[in-house]
Image (cartoon, rainbow, N blue to C red):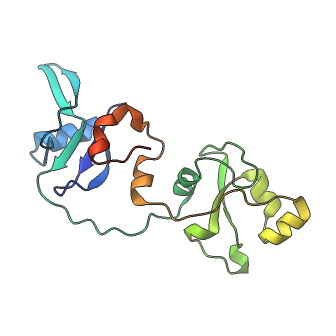
Amino acid sequence: MRKVLLLNASEEILKVITWQHAVKLMLTGKAHKPHGHDDEYEINTTSGIFCLPTALILAQYVHVPYGNVAVNKDNVLKRDEYVCGYCSRRLSSSTGTVDHIIPRCKGGKNVWLNVVASCKGCNNRKDDMSLKEFKAKYGTELMIKPRIPARDFMVFTGMNIDTHETWTRWVEIK
């Protein structure tokens, strides 16, 4: 799948967009190829080959009020790499749930440091127990340490960055 890195006029990473969205931005003059960036996709059209850069920079700076990444099921699963925090079972969007480490009924909040990806079995077993109660009853411990994810991490999670080595000017690939 052809993805394009969208950068603000300051070359700050905004997000990864589809090639179709990238073409629209280029054709309307809202974005262009970054200076010195030569990697591109060749897209066959009825009027010939269209060369689309793998990264685009907006023509005008857009102020983006950055807040924290939203705490929701999809983002928690991404942060925890689709692995249950209790039994390490592989999860999917349909099999994964979000467990509140300190249950909401006991004053726990819906914040990054209090949530973990969980399989339905572990989440149901833990129910409204504290970690201490859960460990005493089932011998199960929390295997990951919840953290607040970086915005850039959430942009690139699940994407095969290796195929975009020309993005290294903007993205640190580990």
Residue at the spot x=79%, y=65% of the render?
127
Residue 48 vertical position relative to residue 168 in the rendered view, above or below: above
Q: Residue at x 33, y 47 (%)?
A: 171
The answer, for residue 31, to whether it is visible in the render is yes
**Residue 151 in the image, given as x and y percentages of width and height:** 40, 59
- Left or right of 20? Residue 86 is right
Q: Is residue 128 shown to the viewer in this render?
A: no
Q: Position of residue 73 (x, y in %)?
A: 57, 57
With 54 as the anchor, is 77 left or right in this view?
A: right
Viewer-proximal residue among 149 and 24: 149
Quarter of the image with the C terminus is top left
Quadrant assignment for the N terminus: top left
Q: Quadrant of residue 111?
A: bottom right
- Counting from the top left corner in percent of width and height, residue 26 is at 14, 41
The image quadrant that residue 55 belongs to is top left
Work out which residue is located at the far right of the displayed protein and give it.
137
Q: Residue at image x 85%, y 70%?
A: 133
Question: Where is residue 100 shown, x and y percent of the image?
Answer: 67, 67
